[in-house]
Image (tube, coloured by chain):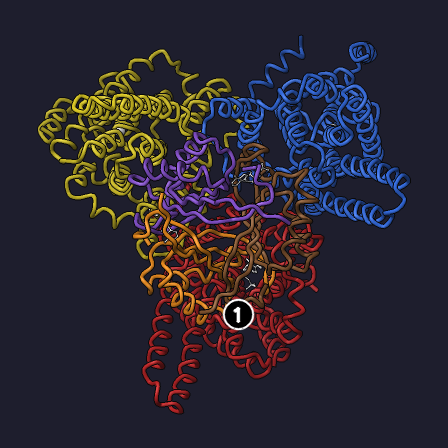
Chain colours: A red, B blue, C yellow, D brown, E purple, F orange
Amino acid sequence: MEILELIQANLLTPIILFFLFGIIAARIKSDLKIPEAISEFLPIYLLAAIGLHGGIEMRNTGFENMLIPMFVAIGLSLLFTLNHYQILRRLGKFNIFDSYALASTYGAVGAVHFSVGLSFLKNQGVSSEGYIAAILAVLEPLAFILAIFMTNMAVSKQIKAKKQSFSDDDTEIDVGLNQTKTKLSKVLHESITGKAIVILLGSIVIGYIIGKDGFESIKIVFDDMFTGAIVIFMIEMGIIAGQRLDDIKKVGIFLTGFAILIPLFNGIIGVLVSTALGLSIGGAVMFGLLMASASFIAAPAVLRHAIPQAKPSLYITSALGITFPFNIIVTLPILFTISTLVHTGEGTIDLFNYITEVFS
Amino acid sequence: MEILELIQANLLTPIILFFLFGIIAARIKSDLKIPEAISEFLPIYLLAAIGLHGGIEMRNTGFENMLIPMFVAIGLSLLFTLNHYQILRRLGKFNIFDSYALASTYGAVGAVHFSVGLSFLKNQGVSSEGYIAAILAVLEPLAFILAIFMTNMAVSKQIKAKKQSFSDDDTEIDVGLNQTKTKLSKVLHESITGKAIVILLGSIVIGYIIGKDGFESIKIVFDDMFTGAIVIFMIEMGIIAGQRLDDIKKVGIFLTGFAILIPLFNGIIGVLVSTALGLSIGGAVMFGLLMASASFIAAPAVLRHAIPQAKPSLYITSALGITFPFNIIVTLPILFTISTLVHTGEGTIDLFNYITEVFS
Amino acid sequence: MEILELIQANLLTPIILFFLFGIIAARIKSDLKIPEAISEFLPIYLLAAIGLHGGIEMRNTGFENMLIPMFVAIGLSLLFTLNHYQILRRLGKFNIFDSYALASTYGAVGAVHFSVGLSFLKNQGVSSEGYIAAILAVLEPLAFILAIFMTNMAVSKQIKAKKQSFSDDDTEIDVGLNQTKTKLSKVLHESITGKAIVILLGSIVIGYIIGKDGFESIKIVFDDMFTGAIVIFMIEMGIIAGQRLDDIKKVGIFLTGFAILIPLFNGIIGVLVSTALGLSIGGAVMFGLLMASASFIAAPAVLRHAIPQAKPSLYITSALGITFPFNIIVTLPILFTISTLVHTGEGTIDLFNYITEVFS
Amino acid sequence: MKLFNVKLLTITCEILAQENIIGILKKHEITGYTTYEVDGNGARGLRGQGFKNEKNVKVEVIMREEKLPDVVEEISRTLFANFAIVLYVSDVGVLRPEKF
Amino acid sequence: MKLFNVKLLTITCEILAQENIIGILKKHEITGYTTYEVDGNGARGLRGQGFKNEKNVKVEVIMREEKLPDVVEEISRTLFANFAIVLYVSDVGVLRPEKF
Amino acid sequence: MKLFNVKLLTITCEILAQENIIGILKKHEITGYTTYEVDGNGARGLRGQGFKNEKNVKVEVIMREEKLPDVVEEISRTLFANFAIVLYVSDVGVLRPEKF
Ligand SMILES: Nc1ncnc2c1ncn2[C@@H]1O[C@H](COP(=O)(O)O)[C@@H](O)[C@H]1O
Ligand SMILES: Nc1ncnc2c1ncn2[C@@H]1O[C@H](COP(=O)(O)O)[C@@H](O)[C@H]1O
Ligand SMILES: Nc1ncnc2c1ncn2[C@@H]1O[C@H](COP(=O)(O)O)[C@@H](O)[C@H]1O
Ligand code: NA
Ligand code: NA
Ligand code: NA
C-alpha cells in the first residue's frame, strides 16, 4: 500500500501535474506551446546542471568505485537491448528495422527521465552517487551503437546473399557494402558527438574541476532553478505526448504492453543489481531508472540516419507517449519503494522472490 | 496630493522605467528587440506564476466566497462592453465592426496589466485575494464571446434583411448564415482553449493542489524571479508601444479620450463595487484593475477571426499605446489610493461624491 | 610567479572552462548549439545587468569624478585606434579598408569582456567604480565613428584625385561624395542607436534612478543570476570561436601577434593611467580591460555597412578567436596583478620600468 | 528523368489568415502544403515587428492545374478584402504527379 | 481566373545587406517585398552558424517587368563586389497586377 | 541586363534528411545552396509540431541543367522511400551563370 501512497504523492508534485496539464492542453487542441528556442535550450540546461552536480559529487566521493557499476550498467544495457530485439522480432512480429530501432530506444537512456528522478529524490530528501551522471553519459550512445551495428550486420548479410545469387554485378554490391560501412562510422561519430553527451560529459568534467566552491557563483542558475526549469520543460513534453496520443492506436496492444512492462522489469533488475553492488538507496533508484528509461529526444536524431527504414512514429510514440508517463508516475515510486525495502534489509529476499515470480 | 506622490513613486519603479525605456528605444529607431521566443515565452511564464500564486492562496482562504465577486465581475464586464459599444457607435460614429471590436477589447481583461498590478501591490506590501486570478481566467474569453455573438447577430440581421428583398437566392444566404454559425462555434472554441486561459486555469488548479509546500521547490522560478521577468517583458511591450505611437494619430481624439477615461471609470467602479462586496484593499485594487484593463495580446488573435472587418490598428494601438501606459502609470496608483480611502473608512462618502461629480 | 598562479586559478573558473568546452565541442564537430533566441537575448540581459549595477554604484558614489577618467578613456581609445592603423597599414601591409576595420575593432570595446571582468572581480572580492559602465557605453561607438570618418576621408580623397584627372564627369563624382556623406550620417545614427549602447545607457540611468532599494525586487534576476548567465553565453562564444579556428590560418602570423600583444599593451597602459587618475584596484582592472578589449559583436554590424570592402573574416576571427580567449585567460589576471602591485605601492616604479622595457 | 508540369500556388498573408487558407485547401481536398513565417511590407504597411500575430506567413501548395481556379477564387473572394495578402502562381516540374 | 504575368525577383544575401537592398527598392518606388532568414553555402562559405549577423536573408519582390532591369542593375553594381549575394528572376502570375 | 537560364531545384523534406541531401549535392560538386526550416503537411502527416527533429527543411539549389538529372535521380533513389520529401524544379534567370 505504501507504493500507492507514494505514487499518489508523486502524482501531486508540480513536475507530474504540469506534464499532465500539457497532455490535457494538447487534447483540447489549445494553441499553448513553449517556444522552440526555449524547449531546445532546456535539455541543454538540464544536462549541464545534471553534469555539474554529478561532477561535484564525484570530486567529493572519488570515482574509483564508479568503474564496476559502469561496466555492469553497460552489460545490462546491452543484454536488455538484445532481449528487447528478441521479444519484438519473435513475439511482436515487427520487421527487422523496427525491432532494432525499438530495442535500442528502450536499451538507451533518457535524460529527461534522469532529471525527473533527481528531482524526485531531492523531494524525498535522498541523495545519490554523483557518478551515475557519468553512467548516463556513457550509456547514452551505447544502445544505439549496438543497434546500428546489428542492423548493419543484418543488412550486409542480406546484400551478401544477393551477391552470391547474382555474381555479375559485384562492384555495385561492394560499393553498397562500403557505403554501409561509411554510414556506420558517420553515425558512430554523430552519436558520440551528439549534443546531449557532449554537454553532459563536459559539465561532469567541469563540475569535477571546480568543485563545490567554484560552483557557488553559478549555483542559483544551475541548482536552485533546476526544478522550476524541469516544470517548464514538462509542459512541452506533455503537449508533445498529448499530440501523439492518437498515434498510440497505431502502436498496437503488443507494443503498448511492451512499453509498460519492459521498462518496469528493467528498472527493478537495475535497482536490485545496483543494490547488490553497494549503491545507496537513491543511487539504486537512479540506476534502476536509467535501465527503465527510454530515449525520445536523442533516439530519433540517431535512428533516423542509422535505420531510416524504421518508423519513427513507432519508437517516438511508445517512448514518449507511453513509457515516459508510466515511468515517472508509476515506475519511479515503485523503484524507490523497492530500493528502500532492499536497503533497509527488511524482506530483501522475499521481495526478490516476489519480483522474480511476477516476471517469470 | 497623495495620489501624485504615489504616481511619482510608481513611475520610478523598474517596471515602469523599463517600459518607458522601451518606448524611447523604439522612437530613436534603435534595433533593440527582445527575441521573439523570449517575448512569446514570457506571457506564458507570467500567467503560470499568477495562476500558481492564485491557486495557492485559494487553498489557504477557500473559494466559497469567490462566487459572488466572480458573478459581479462577469456582470460588470458585460455591462461595460455594452456601454462601450453604445459610446463608440453613437458618440464615436465608428462602424459596427470597429465598435464591437473596441468594445470587447476594453470589456476584456489583460494579463500584463494583472502582472504589473500584482507587482505593484507586492511593492506596497499589500496582498490580494488569490481567487482574483480565477476571475481573470473567467473574464478573459467573456467579452470576446459577447462581442462575437452580438456581431454575428447584427450580421445575420443584415443578411436576413437582404434575404427578404431578393427572395430568389435563398440557399446561398442560408449557407451564409450557417457559415456564420460554424465560425461562431469555432471562435468560441478558440477563445476558450486559447493559451492564456489554458495556462492560467491549469496553474490555478495545480497551485491549489500543491499548496505552499509543493510550491517550495519551484518558488525561486515562479515567484522570486517574477518581477525581473516582468521587467524584461516590459522592455518589449515598450518597444512595440513605441513603434505604434505614429499610429495614434490615426486613432483620433475621440478614441484617445475613450482609451483614457473609460478604463479609469471602469476601474473606479470596480474598486468601489468590490469594496462593497468585502474584498481587501489589495483585492479591490486588482478587481478594479481588471475592470480598467484592456486586452492587447489575446484580442487580436480572437478578433481577427471573429470580426475580420474591424481594423486591428485601431484596437491594438489604443489598448497598448494609450490605455496600458496610462493604466499602469496613473490609473493603478489612483485605484490604490481610492481603495485605501474607502477601506480605511475615511471620507468614503466624500470620495464617492467626488468621483461621481468628476465623471458625471 | 603570482601571475601564473592567478592565471591558473582563473582558468579553472566555470566561465573560462565553459568557454574552452565550447571550443572543444565545435572542434569535434558536435551539433551542440545554444538556440539563437537565447544567444541573442543574453547580451541584452548582460548589458542591462551591467548598466543597472553601474547606475546604482554611481548613485552611491556620485559621478562628478567620472568626467576625467571618461575623457582620458576617449583620448586613449582614439590614440590606440590611430596607432593600430599605422601598425596594420605600415608593418602589416593590410589594405586601407582592412586596416581601418581592424584598427577600430581593437580601438572599440567589448561588452562580453566587460562581463567576464566584472565576474572575475566579484570572484576576487574586489569592487570597481560604477561609472566604468558609463565609460563602456561612451566608448562603444567611438572607435567606429573615428574609423568610419577616417575611411570616408580616405575614400573622398581618392575620389577627388580621380575628379582632377577626369574633370568631365563632375556630377557623378559629386553624387558619389554626397552618397558617402549620407552613408556616414546613417552609420553614425546606427552606431549610436545600436542595441548595445541603448540598453546599456538606459539601464545605467534606470539603475541611477531606482538605487539599491528599487533594485531589490529584480536583484535575483539582474544580479544573482549574472554569472550563471555568462556561463551559458560563454558556451556559445566558445562554439563560435571554435568554428572559426580554421580561419585563423588565413589571419596570418602578423595579425595573430597583433591580436595578442596590442591588447595586452593597451590594457597595461590602461591600468597604469587609470591608477594614476586615482581609480581603485578593481576600477583600474576594468579600465585596462576596456582598453584591451576588442569588439566582436557590435563590430560586424557597424563595419559591414561602414567599410563593406573590409573582410569580416579578418576582424571577427582575430577579435573572437584570438584576442578574446587570450584576454580573459591571460591578460585579465596580468592586469589584476599589475593593478594590485601599483596600488599597494610595492615596486610601482620597478614595474613601470619593467613594462616599458618589455614593450619598447 | 521525366518531370510533370504542375502549378505552385504561393500565398503570403498575415499569420492569422493561415487557418482560413488551410481550411479552404482542405475543402478542396488538398492536404499537402508547406508553411513558414516571414516578414514583409506592402499595402498594409510593415509586418513582422511587434507581436507574433502581426507577422506574415507563406503557404506554398503544389497542385494540379485543374484545382487551381477554384482555390484561387475562394481565397480571393473570402480573404482579399479584410486581410493583408498576396498570391501568385508559377510553373514547376515534379517527378511524382500522383502525389498532388 | 485571369492571371497577369509579372516578375518575381529573389535575392539571397547576407543579412547585413538587407537594408541596402530595401533602400534600393525604395529608391525605385517599390514598397512591397517579403523577407525571411535563411542559411546557406556558396562562394563565401557556409553561412548561418555563429552570430546572427552572419546569417543570410532572402528578399522576394513581385514587380512589373519594366522596373526589373534598373533594380537588378543597381543591386549588382553596388553589392555584388563586397557582399555574399545571389539573385534570380522568375515568371509568376498574379490576380491584381495593379498592386505591384 | 542579360539573364541566363538555369534551373532551381527545391527540395522540401524532413530535417533529418537535410544532411543526406547536402551530401548528394557535394558528391555532384554543387556547393551552393540555401536552406530554411518550414512546417508542412503531406502524405506523412502534419510536420513541425513537437520536437525540432520533426520539422521540415527546404533546400534550394540553383544549378545548370546538365547536373539536374543525376542529382534528382540520386535523391529520389536514396530518399523517396524512407523520408517525407517533395521535390520540384523551376526555371529561373540569373546574371552570373558561371557562379553555378
Ligand atoms: N510586391 C511584393 N512582393 C513580394 N511580397 C509582397 C509584395 N507586396 C506585398 N507582399 C507581401 O504580402 C504581404 C501582404 O501584402 P499587403 O496586403 O499588400 O500588405 C506583405 O506584408 C508582404 O509580405
Ligand atoms: N547555387 C546556389 N543555389 C542556391 N543558393 C545559393 C547558391 N549559391 C549561393 N547561394 C546562396 O547565396 C548566398 C551567398 O552566396 P555566395 O555569395 O556565393 O557565398 C549563400 O550563402 C547561399 O545562401
Ligand atoms: N502538395 C504539396 N505542396 C507543397 N508542399 C508539400 C505538398 N505535399 C507535401 N509537401 C511538403 O513536403 C513534406 C513531405 O511531404 P510528404 O512526404 O508527402 O509527407 C510535407 O511535410 C510538406 O512540407
Ligand atoms: Na533503458
Ligand atoms: Na476591462
Ligand atoms: Na579596446
Residue type marked 1: Tyr
Percent across and percent down for residue C101 are 25, 32
Identify residue for label 1.
Answer: A106
Residue A211 visible in image: no
Percent across and percent down for residue A34 are 58, 47
Q: Residue furthest top?
A: B1
Identify the residue at horizontal 38%, vertical 91% (top origin): A164
Image check: C295 left or right of D65?
Answer: left
Q: Quadrant of residue A63?
A: bottom left
The residue lying toward the viewer, choosing from B226 and A181, is A181
The residue lying toward the viewer, choosing from C251 and F82, is F82
Image check: A20 left or right of A213?
Answer: right
Q: Is mark 1 within 8 Å of ligand 4?
A: yes
Subunit under mark 1 = A
Q: Residues within 10 Å of mark 1 (few under 14, many from 20)?
A: many
Identify the residue at horizontal 29%, vertical 40% (top origin): E81
Percent across and percent down for residue B88 are 77, 23
Residue C287 visible in image: yes
The residue lying toward the viewer, choosing from C76 and B152, is B152
